[in-house]
């Protein structure tokens, strides 16, 4: 049974076949990880239909549990590939098949099976469900859900939302270098747009007829919750906030989305299933509708007065930080980082030939923006060919992502490692799509 599971799991990564019973469509990007295919251009995407069947390769140690001793192929952390002057190539090493003894593996205790399955990448777990009846119902097994909640996160993923021509969700797993198409048939037929994601949950808003609605869903478990109407039910600036240590979440509704109406701040709490009215944000001129949440605080950029508006969730009160923006800043995005870190990302320069992209970090003591890095010119020219070209920027856990709407390109910057890297194979999915980071979880 496990031998079948291992082959099924590894086959999905390399061959990119359609998922068996969950409706997931997978596509594998060549030139990464442990494939024997040479690497392609960093922006190319193709569907692997003819590559040889991949054989699992287990690491060796002092106590080898497999009959075969093979050397594990090391992969880069976080699933990111650094761009170098020459394209990276991987050795064409053929891996021999590992024979699993049915008399041993067929008697593996169920609790060990559960621990093993809990460590399988969430999207690949759907491939293993046809193995047996128990595995088919594994997502309803409380012991599996508990074991899954104790496992480290799968790694950074990008969730894309596209409304043209039909409503469609897709996820790019950066560690697996694979796209997964998520069926949206379980959601109501509304005119949706993406708000964001937090802790495995996704927030969508839309109109059910003429009524403005907010919906929270888990794309993996195909479950959703329609939130009750707000006291001032209209299009608002929303942000989803979830604590990783418990299943509860909050949705914060700040000002009117058009900024021309004064409405009080409202907060939805999943524990009470109610919206509560809080202090109205003072009259200010907002730079944009972009917000950032970190350290239990919501930040918005303001032009008059220049600085940041801060909403403290625990007290329900608004405050002001007189942090002046860097000079010659054309457009800025607030990006949350790990713990208390808050970043500002934007273009600077008056003329197209002199423009560049910089990243600053807020000094909470001095209320100053401190420059931490500048995007190398080769990345800037490739990401934004025109001075007025639109781009998006968002972040999670000190990982900042840049996307270009017109060209469909994606670029990542790891603040901790100080590494820039292209997201390969995303031209179709990122073009004219809303994008955010996403953490696939079954236990929410």
Image: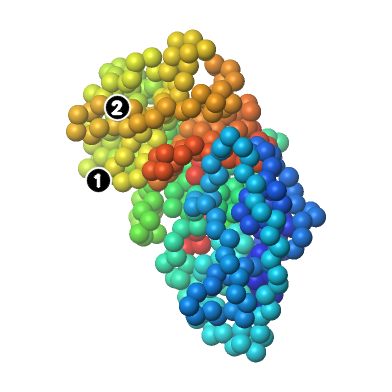
Answer left or right for 140 relative to 325: right
Question: In the rendered image, which residue does mark 2 sit on?
Answer: 369
Question: In the rendered image, which residue does mark 1 sit on?
Answer: 314
Toward which corner of the image does residue 12 lie, by quadrant? bottom right
Tell me which residue sits at (38%, 43%) in the image.
Answer: 416
- 136 or 268: which is nearer to us? 136
Looking at the rendered structure, which numbered label has been put on residue 421? none
**How many numbered dots are placed on residues in this image?**
2
Q: Residue furthest left?
A: 365
The location of residue 99, given as percent across then percent down, is 69, 79
Estimate how packed mark 2 is, as few (under 14), some (14 to 19) or many (20 or more) residues with alpha carbons within 10 Å: some
The location of residue 250, given as percent across then percent down, is 37, 48
Vertical comparison of 42 with 28: above or below: above
Quarter of the N terminus within the rendering: bottom right
Is residue 382 something that shows in the picture? yes
Q: Secondary structure at mark 2?
A: strand
Tell me which residue sits at (62%, 62%) in the image.
Answer: 124
Vertical comparison of 197 with 301: above or below: below
């Amino acid at each position: 049974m496990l031998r079948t599971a291992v082959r099924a799991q590894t086959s999905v990564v390399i061959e990119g076949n359609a998922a068996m019973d969950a409706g997931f469509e997978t596509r594998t990007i060549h030139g990464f990880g442990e494939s024997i295919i040479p690497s392609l251009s960093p922006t190319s995407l193709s569907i692997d239909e003819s590559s040889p069947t991949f054989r699992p390769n287990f690491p060796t140690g002092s106590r080898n549990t497999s009959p075969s001793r093979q050397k594990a192929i090391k992969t880069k952390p976080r699933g990111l590939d650094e761009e170098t002057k020459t394209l990276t190539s991987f050795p064409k090493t053929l891996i021999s098949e590992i024979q699993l003894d049915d008399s041993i593996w067929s008697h593996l205790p169920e609790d060990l099976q559960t621990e093993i399955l809990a460590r399988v990448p969430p999207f690949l777990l759907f491939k293993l469900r046809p193995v047996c009846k128990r595995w088919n119902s594994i997502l309803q097994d409380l012991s599996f859900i508990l074991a899954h909640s104790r496992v480290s996160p799968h790694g950074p993923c990008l969730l894309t939302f596209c409304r043209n021509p039909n409503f469609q969700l897709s996820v790019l797993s950066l560690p697996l270098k694979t796209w997964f198409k998520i069926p949206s048939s379980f959601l109501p037929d509304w005119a949706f747009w993406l708000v964001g994601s937090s802790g495995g949950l996704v927030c969508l808003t839309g109109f059910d007829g003429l009524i403005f609605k907010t919906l929270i869903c888990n794309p993996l478990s195909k479950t959703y919750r329609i939130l009750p109407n707000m006291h001032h039910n209209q299009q608002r600036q929303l942000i989803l906030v979830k604590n990783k240590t418990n299943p509860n979440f909050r949705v914060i509704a700040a000002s009117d989305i058009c900024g021309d109406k004064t409405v009080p701040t409202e907060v939805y709490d999943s524990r009470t299933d109610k919206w509560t009215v809080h202090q109205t944000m003072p009259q200010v001129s907002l730079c944009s509708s972009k917000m950032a949440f970190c350290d239990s605080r919501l930040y918005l950029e303001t032009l008059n007065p220049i600085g940041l508006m801060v909403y403290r969730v625990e007290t329900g009160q608004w405050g002001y930080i007189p942090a002046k923006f860097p000079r010659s800043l054309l457009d800025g995005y607030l990006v949350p980082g790990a713990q208390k870190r808050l970043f500002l990302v934007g273009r600077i320069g008056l003329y197209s030939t002199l423009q560049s992209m910089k990243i600053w970090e807020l000094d909470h003591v001095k209320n100053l923006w401190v420059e931490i890095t500048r995007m190398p010119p080769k990345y800037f020219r490739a990401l934004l060919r025109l001075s007025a070209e639109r781009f998006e920027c968002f972040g999670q856990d000190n990982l900042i992502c840049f996307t270009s709407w017109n060209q469909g390109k994606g670029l990542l910057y790891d603040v901790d490692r100080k590494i820039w890297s292209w997201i390969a194979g995303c031209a179709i999915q990122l073009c004219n799509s809303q994008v955010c980071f996403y953490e696939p979880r079954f236990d929410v």
